[in-house]
Image: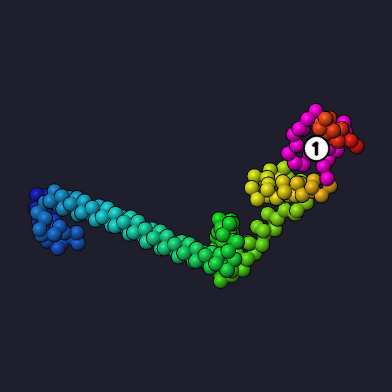
Amino acid sequence: MKEHNKENISEQPEVGSDKGGEAMPQKFATNDQLLRAYEALEAEFTRRSQQLAALKREHGQLQELRLREQRERELEQVAQRRSEALEEFIRRYPKAADIKAELEGSIAEVGDDIEQKLKAAYMDILDRRYVSPEELLESEEFLARCMEDQRIYDGVVMRYLTEISAQGAPVLKRGGYIPLRERSKAASLEDAAEMTRELYKR
């Protein structure tokens, strides 16, 4: 019986041998050494996986940064083309300078038809802003602003004086006329009476 057990023991594979198909490598003398080596390998794998993940994140951030910079360059180019087109349009139509901001907002997208878009926007703005002379005359704000203009004010006064001169002195309600020149001073009481009678004649 004892001899049989000895045979079984002698048949077990030795550490580092190839018998049994699952032999431990020769550099690992014990199972503890193999376990520590596996743990070290696992830790190195985890570290490298983390490094790879960090590199992927960094690559993604760089890609996003490049795309953002490219988009910004494209927007700058579009803005430059829009500005140049608008300046050229204003050079051709100087009065469009008064509505430059509105025109600029009408060409958010720049293409080959930018000039047509500017013309269409210009006509649309002018059409919306147009007010007929009859409507202006009904506007108290417009009339008040006109009277603030010294040239218009002087013109109205001169026209009024011209019409008065042409029609003669206006008649007073109680008789007589408003003098159009400085009143003459009476030299005597009789002259004063005569001037008064003339003033109240109809």
- Say above or below: 124 vs 143: below
Quarter of the view holding residue 145: top right
Q: Which residue is mark 1?
A: 178
In the rendered structure, does residue 173 fall within the stretch colored magenta?
yes
Q: Image quadrant of residue 66? A: bottom left
In magenta segment, residue 139:
no
168 relative to 10, above or below: above
Q: Is residue 140 visible?
A: yes
Residue 154, position as x, y percentages in the image: 68, 48
Magenta residues span 168-189
Q: 4 or 169: nearer the eye?
A: 169
Relative horizontal placement of residue 165, taking residue 106 as reference (left or right):
right
Could you tell me which secondary element the residue under label 1 belongs to? loop
Q: Nearer the viewer, residue 48 or 99?
A: 99
- Residue drawn at x 77%, y 42% as measured from the top left: 180
Q: Position of residue 57 (x, y in %)?
A: 33, 55
Residue displayed at 44% across by 62% down: 76
189 above or below 58?
Answer: above
- Colour setup of the view: rainbow
Nearer-the-camera pick, 90 or 174: 174
Magenta span main SS: loop
User: Can you say which quadrant of the picture contains the C terminus?
Assistant: top right
Q: Position of residue 102 (x, y in %)?
A: 58, 56
Q: Report x, y in % for residue 196.
A: 84, 31
Asked whether residue 67 is in view, the answer is no
Q: Is residue 10 left or right of residue 43?
A: left
